C-alpha cells in the first residue's frame, strides 16, 4: 500500500469558560499557553501524525500567522504568581475530554500528557474527567465544563471555506460551547473583515485577528493534523486539498492490477 496526506485540515484545542474561575483571569489562560510543549505532544502522543499549531488556523490556510508562544515555564510561573498562585498555593483545575474516540484513538493519553505538562509548572494541579461526545456536548452547552479539550471541524464535516474566518468566527459569534468570550475589539475586527474586499487589506486584518486571539485566547490551539489516505500501489495522482477533500476525479491507475482504490479518514473511493 502507498500512503498519502494533504495539508492540515483539523485542529485540537483547549476551550475555556471565561466567566468561570480561574479562566476569567487572562494571565491564567496565558500561563496554560506557555506551559505547553507542542513538539513533545505531537511526537510522543501522536507519533508525528499531528504537528504543532501556533495560530487558531492551520498553517495551510491563506493568512495564517504564527502568534502563539512556545513553551516557557518560567514565564508561566511568573504569570501565575501575579494572580496569586505558586508552588505553595497551587491552582487546582479540571480538564474534560471526549472519551468515545471522536477526535482520536488516544484522547485519554493526549489529555494525560497535557495534565503532565501543566503540572510541570509546579503550580497547576489537574484533575481529568471525560464523557462520550453526546453527553459532553450537552453539558458543555450548559456551561458545566470550565475547561475542555476539543477538535475542529467535526469529523467528516470540513470547514466551508479555505479562509481564516472559517476557523475563527464561530467561536466568537456563537456561545454554543459556552466560551462567554466578549471583546469589543474582536467584534470590530470581524465587522471590518466582513466588509473588506481588498485582499491585501483583508490579510492585514486577519493578522490582527490572530494576534488578538493569542492575547485573549477564545481557544488555545495546540496541534493540527492532515487527512491521511492509503491506496493500492498502482494508484497515482492522489490529491487531498486543504479542506481535507479527496479529489477522486483525477485518480489514475497503472499496470494491470485491477481496481483503483483509495481509503482515507473521511471517504472510501472506488472507480472501475
Image (cartoon, rainbow, N blue to C red):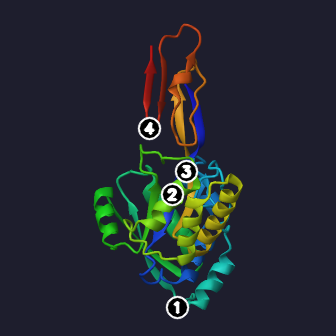
Badge 2 vs badge 1, beta-carbon distance below 8 Å: no
Residue linked to disc 1: 89
Q: Secondary structure at mark 2?
A: strand
Q: Is residue 245 above or below residue 90?
A: above
Q: Position of residue 123 (x, y in %)?
A: 55, 82
Sequence-first tag of 3 and 2: 2
Q: How many marks?
A: 4
Across and down, in percent, residue 56 comes to 57, 60
Q: CA distance from mark 4 to mark 1?
A: 47 Å
Q: Which one is in front in this view, the residue at disc 3 or the one at disc 4?
A: 4
Residue ID at (57%, 20%): 233
Image coords of residue 79 (percent x, y): 62, 84
Left or right for 73, reference 113: right
Q: Which residue is mark 2?
A: 12
Q: Nearer the viewer, residue 193 or 26?
A: 193
From the viewer's perspective, is the residue at label 4 or at label 1 nearer? 4
First of labels 3, 4 by sequence position: 3
Q: Are marks 3 and 4 in contact (CB under 8 Å)?
A: no
- Please tell me the numbered disc located at residue 98: none
- Residue 104, compared with residue 212, is above or below; it is above
Q: Are marks 1 and 3 in contact (CB under 8 Å)?
A: no
Please name the residue that numbered disc 3 is placed on. Answer: 46
Which quadrant of the structure image shows residue 94? bottom left
Q: Quadrant of the C terminus?
A: top left
Which SS class for mark 4? loop
Amino acid at each position: 500500500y502507498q500512503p498519502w496526506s494533504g495539508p492540515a485540515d483539523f485542529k485540537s484545542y483547549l476551550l475555556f469558560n471565561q466567566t468561570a474561575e480561574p479562566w476569567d483571569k487572562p494571565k491564567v489562560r496565558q500561563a496554560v499557553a506557555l506551559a505547553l510543549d507542542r513538539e513533545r505532544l505531537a511526537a510522543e502522543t501522536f507519533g508525528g501524525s499531528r504537528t504543532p499549531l501556533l495560530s487558531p488556523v492551520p498553517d495551510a490556510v491563506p493568512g495564517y500567522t504564527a502568534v502563539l508562544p512556545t513553551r516557557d515555564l518560567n514565564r508561566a510561573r511568573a504569570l501565575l504568581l501575579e494572580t496569586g498562585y505558586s508552588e505553595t498555593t497551587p491552582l487546582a483545575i479540571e480538564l474534560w475530554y471526549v472519551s468515545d474516540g471522536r477526535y482520536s484513538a488516544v484522547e485519554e493519553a493526549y489529555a494525560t500528557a497535557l495534565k503532565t505538562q501543566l503540572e510541570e509548572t509546579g503550580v497547576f494541579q489537574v484533575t481529568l474527567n471525560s464523557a462520550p461526545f453526546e453527553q459532553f456536548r450537552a453539558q458543555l452547552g450548559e456551561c458545566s465544563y470550565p475547561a475542555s479539550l476539543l477538535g475542529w471541524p467535526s469529523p467528516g464535516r470540513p470547514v466551508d471555506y479555505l479562509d481564516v474566518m472559517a476557523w475563527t468566527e464561530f467561536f466568537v459569534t456563537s456561545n454554543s460551547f459556552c466560551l462567554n468570550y466578549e471583546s469589543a475589539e474582536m467584534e470590530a475586527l470581524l465587522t471590518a473583515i466582513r466588509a473588506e474586499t481588498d485582499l491585501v487589506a483583508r490579510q492585514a486584518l486577519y493578522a490582527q485577528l490572530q494576534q488578538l486571539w493569542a492575547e485573549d485566547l477564545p481557544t488555545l490551539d495546540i496541534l493540527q493534523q492532515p487527512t491521511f489516505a492509503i491506496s493500492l500501489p498502482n494508484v497515482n495522482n492522489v490529491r487531498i486539498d486543504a479542506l481535507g477533500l479527496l479529489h477522486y476525479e483525477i485518480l489514475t491507475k497503472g499496470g494491470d492490477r485491477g481496481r483503483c482504490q483509495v481509503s482515507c479518514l473521511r471517504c472510501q473511493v472506488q472507480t472501475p
